[in-house]
Amino acid sequence: MVLKRAMFGVVLSGLLLACGDAAVDGQGGGGGCAEITGNYSVMVTNTGGNCGEGTSETSITIGNDGSGFYVLVPGLEGACPANLDESSCRFTANCKVSDKADPNKTIATYSMDYTFSGATFSGSLVGAITSGPDACESQVTHEGTRL
């Protein structure tokens, strides 16, 4: 996942206010989970940290390419691999964002932890811009609805 430094502050603020390998099929159905792939509108509420405050709305896309789940975040290039535990409908992703000019340099990290119920989910995201003048950390809650 690669991002221009200036854009990441905007994306992280929106996402924070606004990854591992999957071991299940794209249907997400076995343990009572509905099909989870799709586009989601996400209401974001800041619960701590110093990256921003208040509430905002953003979107994410959850997909499955046949080899596993992934998350696409607006403003970031590339996808973050994710996991679905079908027994609990728990979806997790741990992501690193690289500097576009230096792909070996991690400039941010974020971890998502969602629980799905039908076409909605709730959960949290913890993220950090790890270097530069915009360095910060944030914790937020996410409430998502499939579009």
Image (cartoon, rainbow, N blue to C red):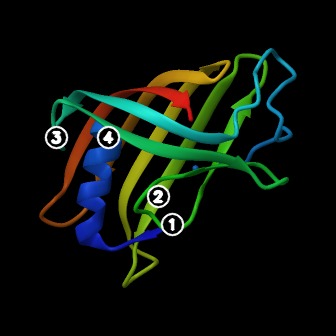
Q: Are marks 2 and 1 in contact (CB under 8 Å)?
A: yes
Say whether disc 3 or disc 4 marks the residue closer to the N-terminus: 4
Say which of 54 and 114 sits in front: 54
Disc 2: which residue: 96
Q: Are marks 3 and 4 in contact (CB under 8 Å)?
A: yes
Query: The residue under label 4 is which amino acid type?
Result: Leu
Distance of label 4 from label 1 (alpha carbons): 17 Å
Please provide percent x and percent y for residue 5.
27, 71
Distance of label 2 from label 4 (alpha carbons): 14 Å
Please provide percent x and percent y for residue 20.
65, 48
Say whether disc 2 or disc 1 marks the residue closer to the N-terminus: 1
Disc 3: which residue: 52
Say which of 60 and 146 sits in front: 146
Q: Residue at x 68, y 18 (%)?
A: 118
Disc 1: which residue: 1
Distance of label 3 from label 4 (alpha carbons): 8 Å
Is any part of residue 132 visible from this angle? yes
Query: The residue under label 1 is which amino acid type?
Result: Met
Note whether 142 is above or below 69 in the view shown.
above
Query: The residue under label 3 is which amino acid type?
Result: Gly
Disc 4: which residue: 16
Crowding at label 2, few (<14), some or many (≥20) Cα neighbours within 10 Å? some
Say whether disc 1 or disc 3 marks the residue closer to the N-terminus: 1
Crowding at label 1, few (<14), some or many (≥20) Cα neighbours within 10 Å? some
Q: Residue at x 64, y 44 (%)?
A: 82
Is any part of residue 130 visible from this angle? no
